[in-house]
Every structure is written in structure tokens, then in C-alpha cells.
Amino acid sequence: GDEHAPFDVLGYGQDAFSTRQIREEFEDNLHFFVEECDRLQGFQVMASVDNGFSGLATEALSGLVDEYGKRAMVTYALLEPSATVPRALQARKTINAAIALTSLVEHSTVVPVSMDGQWRCDTKCREVRGLLVDRESRFQTAAALACAIDTSLLATRQATSPRGLAEVLAGASWCQRRPLSLLSVAMPLGPSLDHNHGDHPWTLARSLREQRQVQGSIAVATSQQAQQPKLCQGLRNCLTTPLCPGIAARVKDGPPPPKAWSSDVTVRGVQGHAAVDKDDSLFNRCSSAADVLQQYMAQSGSATRFSVSQATAGFPTRHPFPGRMVRRSSGGAEATLATLESTPELADALQALHKGFAAVRWQSQTVYREHGFGSDEAEEVAEQLLSIGEQYEPN
């Protein structure tokens, strides 16, 4: 749409998809690409869920399920930064997101993705350590999110020993027992993130164990473990940034996040010499970044079930990636780490969305009533948000 007729209501997207031209064009393009696949694993969907495209996404995904119901499906539910949305339209952003998420979780694993810390009227952009992001730039915020999304499913696209999409999603959503997954990212990995190593070269292993005595250090469970250096929740507390609204920012000296039920970890661009020191007493049997992360995850207890994948190439930061976002240069590619997790933190995200949705003044939202969405439907969506959130309450 344009400024006089913005495409900012879920119902607009549903109406658009119901037209014969758009529906047939979607189906023709879908069938073309499916026929090009040698072995169809499933579908990776990326859709804005806080504007009219949320309606297109819910209708399109419903059609995918009808035709390819047994295939693995993941939906990256994208939310536009609040700084780029007029304040008068913030309520619609929340309404669209709530309705869309409660619909999309019926058909796929859903990964809410945003640079905002809150669902509406956020004044701050997520700070990804090592990146300089202009929160008012759609181009820069999209570039940061693209890095995380691209890395999170990289294991399914590798030329050698690729993992299946269903396998990755099983790790991301606790064997698909819970419909949401939390995406977190660390980019770039490297010496610019750690300033206490003196003359020692940076390694991933040192980053994971550098602050042995900080608040939130992992409790030592056995006498054998007591002889080993304590690990902080470095992967989830110090390095990675959660990219879902409603989840508190992770700080280096703060309490660790709750233990995840399952976690799928992907690291790229960290070569063997940058993974571990030869004299490292904790990771001395590791020869790769994947080995370091496997041992870290096993000993830290940060997830009940986990898997780790590794790729040689870093995330490309050459043109058109906005070069000024990266504080340092590594020849046009940056070491990156991304995680997809089923975690109790998602309960906070859903509670925050429910709170924003419940605060909407429906008397002023006539456009939704015109599309058959009134107070009764709103109450049902609110109950669904609470019901989904209960699945993520800590055991």
C-alpha cells in the first residue's frame, strides 16, 4: 500500500490472498520450485506478522499444510522495528502479531524475530555485541536479522553431511512438542568481544570460560567436576543476543537464563586454531569449534537436549551488507554463532504480547470489526496466547 492506504491490517492480507490472481500466482510459483527439488524436506517461510502480510502468511501457510501437511515447516515471524512504525499504528502492529502467531503455531514451528526488545512502542534496539545497528534503518536491522536467520538453518544447506530440516526443528522446538523457538545470535565472534586476554590470541573456548567467578556461574554438581574450572553461561549469557520481543536482554554479570529444554547450535567461520588453546585444561581434547561447543553444552547444563553444527565459511559481510555495521573486518566474512532453542524464556515473550494485546482499545479498531474480528474473537486470541505461554512455564 501507500501512505494513504497502508497495508497494515491482517484482514487486508487475507482479502488479498482470496483473490484468484494472487492465489493462483502463489500456487504456480510454489509448484515450480517444488518440482525443482530432488528431495523436498519441508518449507522455510519468512513473513512479516505485524502488518497486512500477516494475513497473507496465515492463508498461504494453511494452503501449504493442506497440500504438503507431512513436511517440516518453520516460519520466521518478522516484526518491523518500532522506530520505523508511526506511533498511531503501534496498536495494529500488536494486534496483527498476536492473531498471526496464534494461527501460525497450528501449522509450523514459529520463530519470532525482531530487533525490538518489546512488542510495541520500544525505545531501544537490541544491541548485538560487535554490531553497530541504526535502529531507524530498515536496511541495517534487516541485515542483522538476515545474519541470524541464515546461520540458524545453515546445517540443512551444507554440501557435505547436511542435516534434515525436521532434525533441526526437533532440536529447536523440543521434538516439536512446543510450537515456538527462540533465535539468538552472536556476530561477530572474535577478539573484539573479549578484552581481557592480554597477549593471548582469542579462542572460542576462552570466551566460554573467561569469567569463572561471575554471578550466574554454573553450580558444580560432583566432586569430579569441582576439580575443573567453573564455566559461566557464556554461550547464552555473554555471547548471544535473543532476537524475540518480550525477552530481557542478557548481560554478562547477570543471572543466567533458565535451562532450555532443547537447543540447536550452529557456529560458522571459527577455524581449529581459533577454537581452543593447546594448553587449555578444560577443552584440551577438542579439535574444532563444534567439539568445544559440544563439551561446553554437556558440562554447562544449559540445555537438556542439544545438537551442534559447524561450517567453515563465515557469514559474508561484503557488499551489499552494510560494512559500517561491523566494527572490524575479517576479509568480508565474520565468524557467527546462532541458536534455536525451546526455552522457558518464551513464556515471558508470550506474556508480554498478551499484555500488549489485552491493552488494546477495541472501540477504536473498527477496521478489524469490518473484517469479522470483534471483541469475542479478541478474547479467544488472548486465551490462546495464555494457553501457549503455559507450555513454556518452567517445570
Image: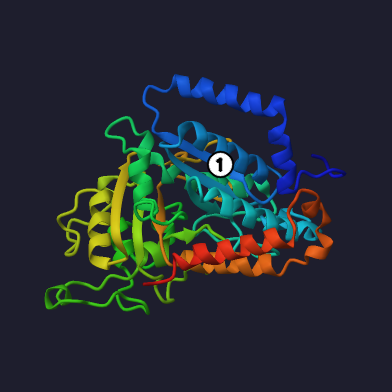
Q: Is residue 123 visible?
A: no
Q: Dot 1 corresponds to which residue?
A: 46
Q: Is residue 131 visible?
A: yes
Residue placed at 48% from the left, 64% from the top?
346
Residue placed at 68% from the left, 34% from the top?
17
In the image, 88 versus 100, the foreground residue is: 100
Relative to 206, 7 lies left or right: right
Relative to 232, 195 lies left or right: right
Three-letter amino acid code at disc 1?
A: Met
Q: Is residue 322 above or below residue 392?
A: above
Quadrant of the snapshot with the C terminus? bottom left
Q: How is the image coloured?
A: rainbow
Q: Residue furthest front?
A: 376
Residue 302: give x, y in percent of width and height. Answer: 32, 65
Q: Residue furthest left?
A: 224
Residue placed at 41% from the left, 53% from the top?
340
Relative to 234, 84 lies left or right: right
Residue placed at 38% from the left, 55% from the top?
177
Q: Is residue 100 above or below residue 194?
A: above
Element marked by disc 1:
strand
Residue 209: give x, y in percent of width and height. Answer: 29, 67
Residue 271: give x, y in percent of width and height. Answer: 29, 45
Q: Is residue 35 above or below residue 244?
A: above
Residue 182: give x, y in percent of width and height. Answer: 46, 57
